[in-house]
Image (cartoon, helix red, strand yellow):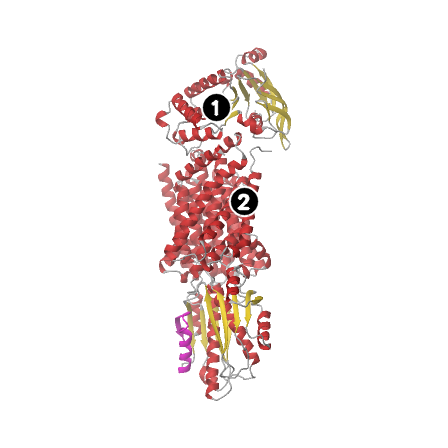
Amino acid sequence: MRRLRFLLEKEFRQIFRNKIILAMIVVIPTIQLIILPLAANYEVSNIQLAIVNHDHSQATTQFIQKILSSGYFKLKASSDSYDKMFHLLSKDQIDLILEIPNDFDKHLQRGEAQKLLIAVHAINGVKANLGASYLNEIIKDYSSQINLEFLEKNGGRSPQVLQISTSFWYNPLMKYKYFMVPGILAILVTMVGSYMSALNIVKEKEAGTIEQINVSSIRKYQFILGKLIPFWILGIMVFSIGLLVSRIIYGIVPQGNLPTLYLFIAIYLVAVLGLGLLISTFCDTQQQAMFIAFFFVMIFILLGGLFTPIDSMPEWAQFIAYANPVTYLIEVMRMVVLKGSGFADLKRHFLIVGAYAIGFNVLAVLNYRKTIN
Amino acid sequence: MKQLFAFIRKEFAHVLRDKKTLLILLGMPIAQILIFGFALSNEVKNARLIIWDQSQNAESRQLIHKIGNSKNFELVKYFHSEAELENVFKSNQAKIALIIGPGFDALAAPDRKQSMQIIADASDPNIAQTLNLYLRANIGQFQQENSPQLKPHFQITTEMRMLYNPQLKSAHNFVPGVMALIMMLVCVMMTAISIVREKESGTMEILLVSPLQPFMIVIAKTIPYLIISLVNITSILLLSVFLMDLPILGNIVLLYAECTLFIIACLSIGILISIKTESQQSAMLISLMGMMLPTLLFSGFMFPIENMPIPLQYISDVVPSKWFYIIVKSIMIKGLGFADIWKETCILFGTACFFILVSLKQFKIRLQ
Amino acid sequence: MNPVIKTVNLSKQFGNFTAVDSLNFEVYPGEIFGFLGANGAGKTTAIRMLCGLLKPSSGDAKVAGYDIYRETNHLKDNIGYMSQKFSLYEDLSIVENIRFYGGIYGLSDEQIKQKSKTFIEDLGLESQKNKMVQSLPLGWKQKLAFSIAMMHEPKIVFLDEPTAGVDPLSRRQFWDMIYAAAARKITMFITTHYMDEAEYCDRISIMVDGKMAAIDTPSSLKKQFELDSIDAVFLKLARGSSSPMQ
């Protein structure tokens, strides 16, 4: 145990002398937390709409007003010519084109069916498609509205009025940032933890100092612990700084209780550091370690439900997602911060991450050979 | 010239010998394309739903049956109190809840208003919105099916035309983005690290003393990564075309030419980084944070640039990958020709020249 | 006298290549033993096996009385090792390096303090003791690494090319340190390319193609081969090697 103390002393000395690591711990996460949520904005608003209006009746003008008043769209251009608007769309300046045919209102009044054309710039995934659905909904709404009015005026029997109210829980302001920031903090902790521990043992291998360790009677587990503990402490620091930054800049205050959150992070860090250490036992150069760590972390992040929901993934991908420790951290972060979930709600998450923590580290210890075969 | 080839051959040997890294360099684009192409999607289906049926009559059961059958929702369970609802949400068992008020009747008298409540977990606001819309649509449909057959007087229908991407394949969006990302990774990070490594281990000096022009040595080091990047682009294109039915509408030669231009720009950035940094760690850090992250964020393939605050939009103008992304999209998906992208090409060309010149200058300063 | 190293048919194969072929030899306490051989002759492989860093393919060996297969941890408590790279932490100071290795070897705080004082005084590094090892010239790093390898008073110290690239004056001083240690009955097992250093050893062995081609005192070897210098003896034996590297 005493030897462990010396190992730890050395690690801390080296860490605090290494300006790069210090930058990684404090500066980078802060910058990322600030810029990432600003950039990673999937909120659907400001959809650039172009209207090709061949019918200038008052009713149509009202119709267009209704669309614009929904707040989702910005009228970028309007014209008589579809081609002109298409040209703008091909320059990526327009997301949707709505074309209203000639004498739209007149035909409608006569009871003839009318077709509206919605042209969608479909390369741009989320925004344009969601925008098209919204536009569709508004049009449908408008349609039922004028039909109802017509019925009422003519004394017909209207279908019953169903009052459906919707309430949005946990994020009533519907701010996408509240959803992203905890997730981003999760991947930050993951990246810092795994990269630093992956590089560390390899650096000693490259410098040759690992031979002295191998030649001494230090036990493998002592050596691994000596590497784990300093970076674990750093990881907790990064996390805490991250929470602070989230609170100051975004006003995000965790709804759930902090001890639960910290307990989970503590276990999660052990898992992620263990993964880094395991990777470093396989590599001989920092380049290799960095690359392999980067590869795995990237896959974990993509399949972790940060940017796209896990529920939307095909079965095989969901399987991988639920075998991925990062998924659980992202879920826990969102659940505790936004919904105030408690330990009981997270039992499964604790269990799985705990298993990884033990698994990765045991493998790292087993794989680290002081004596090569 | 012959000497240059000898050097290039040696550099190739280095790269090929490191099998682990090579595997990842070649395998990463494939993994990314597979994930983006087949695993990631924003489509909402089988959303977990819970229901509180306060009516418990034939109509409400019909409605529940209909909703349960739709592909959008999966009825997970019934609940009977708000406390239960909270528990379900807090443990992520469902994303949306429907409360059917007492006395549900699709054909009630006009003056009797029924109530229904939708409660959505808005942690993910987009999903919540979408689910809300879908649920309302479902209920609305149910209503229409059960009302007396009344043909609405005003019939408005919509025709949706998906431009450039009729099957709504997200591949069109991300494939160019993945290309940019991979090239950044290989050309900037790998190049920077491998040159700095020589500096760290001291073998750089040996090279500098050789008869070959010093800067030529650095160029020789980048050639393997140029080739690897071209191989990666080819595998990405092959996967996209054959596995994901992505068309290449434009001129392939033009596409490869633009890719090569982008590669050269990235390589020159990598060289500059390697000249200015002293350790592998810092080279890695700068490449990751300074180049890859901005590429991910600001090239426009993952997040819409128009949504960002104006200062960030300016930053995105400075990121070379953004222009590359536009070029590739234009050629591959819109089938445009050089005339339409000459502006962006110039920007890339200018970027490459700029970094090459700066690197040259810095390199000479170093040698002094 | 019990040998501090005893090997019986110690061998190591890497695939088809035999790096070390049936080594049989003994080294006695307090000896300065020179382990010579050309590059690729198997020296480093043999040392690594004796230090418990590499598992042999076959054969047995006991170092400091401990079996190299089953008792590596005890073995390691009783040996010192100085590798070609010196293995000091460049980003730690002299004092910090001493403190770290002392702790790793199990010395008490008091012992560490004492050793630290002694080393720094003996090496004349008082003014540099808080500087990073990175800033030390090669000769000093080497002497410091040697002192550290001996800090826990091991029975035997393995030195793998300890004077490679070091200036002649430092080399001379280094050998003074080796003599002093041998006088304290600490065995010195040294590999070197400098044939003049071979003359300083009590006994030397010469490895060729993984086998031990000769083992005796320097003077006996010279007499045996009727040559004037160990350099000549070495060249003669090495030229008979089947390895293309000669």
Chain of residue at mark 1: C
Residue sitting nearer the eye, B59 or B31: B59
* Residue C165 placement, left or right of C11: left
Q: Nearer the viewer, residue C44 or A51?
A: C44
Above or below for C114 versus A20: above
Q: Amino acid at mark 2?
A: Leu
Residue B96 can be seen, yes or no: yes
Secondary structure under tag 2 reads helix
Identify the amino acid type marked 1. Met
Residue shown at the point (36%, 60%) measured from the top left: B310
Q: Quadrant of the C terminus of chain A?
A: top right
> In the rendered image, which residue does mark 1 sit on?
C150
Residue B22: assigned label: 2
Q: Is A333 contained in the magenta span? A: no
Report x, y in % for residue C211. 61, 22
Left or right relative to B57: residue A66: left
Image spot of residue B64 (x, y percent) = 58, 72
In the rendered image, the vertical position of residue A343 relative to residue A4, given as above or below: below
Query: Residue B76 versus residue C122: which sits nearer the camera?
Result: B76
Q: Secondary structure at mark 1?
A: loop
- Residue B244, percent across and down? 57, 60
User: Quick check: C228 above or below A357?
Assistant: above
User: Does A69 appear in magenta?
Assistant: yes
Q: Residue A47: x, y in percent?
A: 42, 68
Crowd around label 1: few <14 · some 14–19 · many ≥20 (10 Å): many
Residues A274 and A143: in front is: A274
Letter of the chain that mark 2 sits on in the rendering? B
**Magenta stretch bounds:** A57-80
| Residue at image location 46% in from the left, 33% down from the top | A6
Quote the CA–CA distance across marks 1 and 2: 42 Å
Q: Nearer the viewer, mark 1 or mark 2?
A: 1
Task: Examine the rendering and report whether any part of residue C165 can be seen.
Answer: no
